[in-house]
Structures are given as C-alpha cells and as structure tokens.
Image (cartoon, grey):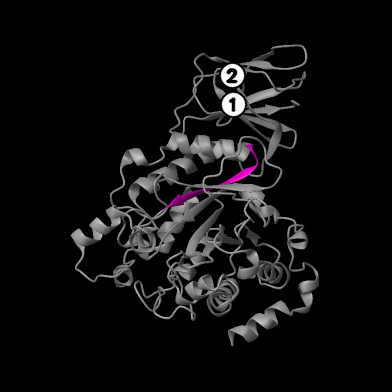
Amino acid sequence: MAAVFLLLAFASPAAARYTANWTSLDARPLPSWYDEAKVGIFVHWGVFSVPGFDSEWFWWHWKGQKPPDPKCVNYMSKNYPPGFSYPDFAPQFHAQFFNPEEWADIFKASGAKYVVLTSKHHEGFTNWGSPYSWNWNSVDNGPKRDLVEDLGDAVRNRSLHYGLYNSLYEWFNPLYLEDKNNGFKTQQFVMRKLLPELYNIVVRYRPEVIWSDGDWEAPDTYWTSTQFLAWLYNDSPVKDTVVTNDRWGQGTACKHGGFYNCQDKYTPGQLPKHKWEKCTSVDTLSWGYRRNMKLKELMDLPSIIDDLVSTVALGGNYLLNVGPTADGTIPSVFEERLRGVGAWLETNGEAIYSTKPWRVQMENGTVPVWYTSKGATVYAIITAKPPTTTLKLLIPQTSATTKVTLLGRPPSLPWAPLYPNAGLSVLLPELPFTPGQAWTLKLDNVQ
C-alpha cells in the first residue's frame, strides 16, 4: 500500500513545475511569510523527556555509542531496576498536564510568529498516531493522544504558523540498521517507514515548515529527498506556503533546500547570500528537558535578545527552543524567558518583523549597534546601555528631513550631524528599564 501511494504521489501530473533535482528545487522562491515572521519557537518533546537527563540523545549515549557515556550508565543503574529498557520509559510519558491552549498562549505572548514541534526525534517515537510506528507513538502509548494535532489546532487558533520537525533516521530501527549495513544500497526503511510518515504528516496536519534532521549518515539519494520535495512543492496541500530547511542528506546543509540552518546554533560572521535560520536553545546544554539543569546553564534574557537582534540584522530568522517536561508543562524558567522576549518585541518588534538587512549590519562604537531596515526607515538597535546621554552613529547619511525617535517614546529626539556627509549624534532621554537591555532608535529619511 505504501509503495503504491508513493508511486501515485511521485507521478502526479502537476510535478512538471519543479522536478526532482536540486537545480529545480533550489529555484523555488521562499514563501514570503517566513522571512517576514523572523521569530519562531522550537519545541523538543518526546520519550527522552521522561528520563530528563543528559539530553534528547540520552538513549544513544546510553546504548548506542561505543563506549557508552558513563554518566548515563550510572544514572540508570542507580535509579532503575536491572533490565529496564528505554522503551519502558514510554508509558511514563503521560503528558497529563499538557494543555495546548496554555502552550499556545505562551508562544503567542513570546512574540513568535511560528512554532515548530518535534513530530519524531531520532528515537523514532512519533507524537501522533502514526500507522507506521505501531505502539511506538503517542496515541498507542504514553499520552494516548495526538500531540501534533492538539498543539497545531491551538497554535493556528492564535494565527501562528505551525511547523513540524522530523528526523529522517532512527537510531535503532531494524529497517534502518539493515539499510545501513547494506551501505545504504537498499531503502527498506525509507520506503516502508520514513516516506509514508512524511506524506502522512503533510496530508493530515498541513505543516508550513518541514524541519528535517538526522540526514548526515546517508546521501540524499538514499532518503529520496528530491522526489519528496518535488511532491511537497508541486502537489501537497501546503505547496504554496510550506518552507523547508537544508538537512536532506550528506553534504546538503548550507547548499540545498529552502532556508539554511547549516548547523545547530549557526552564527555567520557576515551577511549570508541565502535566507537562513539560527536555531538555539534556552538550555545551552540540551534541546530536550533536563531535570538537573542549572540557572547558569540557561541563556538569560539579554543574551537571547542580543542573539535575536544580531540574527535578524544579518538576514536570519531566530528559532528559540524550549524542552517541556514529560508531564506536559513548560518549565517556569522557560516561560519567563519567552514572555520576556515578547515584552521586548511588543515595544521593538517594528525593528524586527518584516525588516530587511541594511547596507551595513553593525557598527561597534561605544556600544554595539545593529541595523535593520524597512522601506525608507532604518532602525538602530542598541544592545547595551550607552555610558553617556549622547550616542554617536557613524554610518547613517542624514538629510534636513531626518527624524530620530526612540521606539516606545513618541517625541522625536534632538540630533546633530557628525560630518558633512555622514553620521549623527543623538541626545538620548533617560532610557526606560527593559529586561532585555536593548533599545531601538528609528531613523527616518536617512541613507
């Protein structure tokens, strides 16, 4: 049945628009909503949230890598009976406090415009009732509910875009291990598990982001990536709005796909030529929930705001991750960070949403200043409090009609030219307190 479905999908007559090769697929324009959104929330949630130790890679560190991580081995030997296996964690993934409406309220309050949930991580457990993952999914086991659908409905009811993360590979799936042992010359896993599930989530949930991962062990020809993307762009229910990343096989990162991730926490030193996204996590040591995380291991709000601003100034989107508990709650410290981002964006969002990189992205004077632009307006975002009430901006070229305002404070600010053709000195008011420790000057009629 799966093979027949795949053949029908690949043979659709509309597929002539984009063909199953990177030259054609890479020519597809990125749907405009994505670049305008700028800010998203990433959610890593799964069976790995039950042990809540080490990271979402716990199973691999315990049973996959050779030698195993002694921290994970000791954790299991001290806290669980002999013979306890990783699948035994699944019934404890209760999600009994999971309220998708509350989650969606937090995400909306964060100022994010899109949300990306892990539909399936490398452990293979699906957060929906996948017909291709018997008893290793959230409907048959654990929560006994469709987590993908429940969160998607709540997120969309708040006019947020909804995306799904999907791992191409699964550490211990016998079909995958068989293909791996065959040097990826067979595709049992791809045809019987991966592709049927990908089509399933697209048709059922209509995600506007497919955030692919777990691609690095095999080439894109093994994953049949280009054929899937041709169907996604030509014939799927989200063909006009869906965006994808660049993790579709060995060597595709930073080269092929919709937007580029390049690598986790990617931070380019200069303006990239292609639309990109920085994914990073509030917990600097893990994407999934850790019960033993320490405050010093978390990004504080000023660091998050600085990271967000520099990312957007360099043309990127900012995807900030939180890891919920197995009970289905977002830890209060994560919620505090997200609401803090939202409070900052409520005042400064004009300088973030729907902006474009300016001709110069940053100047480093007495304080760091990042620039964004929107039409004829330039925004100078100050990510540290200036030591004096006078701020010098060397780059903007002023005119007689130049106007300077501080976002959140309506009256225009006094300014004077620094040089005949460039620069201005702005007299700042007493800067209001902001937990993000960043302020935005709006510059009208400058070049």
Q: Nearer the viewer, residue 445 or 163?
A: 163
Dot 1 falls on a residue whose secondary structure is strand
* Residue drawn at the location 68% of the way across and 79% of the way down: 9
Where is residue 258? Give x, y as percent: 67, 56
Residue 365 got which mark?
A: 2
Q: Is residue 60 magenta?
A: no
Place residue 114 in its image quadrant: bottom right
Q: Nearer the viewer, residue 278 or 387?
A: 278
Is residue 322 placed above or below 378 in the rendered structure?
Answer: below
Is residue 102 placed above or below 278 in the rendered structure?
Answer: below
* Residue drawn at the location 69% of the way across and 83% of the way down: 8
Position of residue 107 in the picture relative to residue 84 (left or right): right
Quadrant the C terminus occupies: top right
Position of residue 15 in the picture relative to residue 309 (left or right): right
Q: What number of labels is visible?
A: 2
Position of residue 210 in the picture relative to residue 327 (left or right): right
Q: Estimate the spatial distance between the alpha carbons at disc 1 and disc 2, rounded to whole Å.
A: 8 Å
Where is residue 76? Give x, y as percent: 24, 61
Position of residue 441 in the picture relative to residue 30 (left or right): left
- Residue under pointer 1: 369
Residues packed near mark 1 inside 10 Å, few (<14), some (14 to 19) or many (20 plus): many
Q: Is residue 320 magenta?
A: yes
Where is residue 290? Give x, y as percent: 33, 52
Is there a contact, CB below 8 Å, between mark 1 and mark 2? yes
Place residue 212 in its image quadrant: bottom right
Residue at the outermost right position: 16
Quadrant the N terminus occupies: bottom right
Where is residue 188? Give x, y as percent: 55, 79
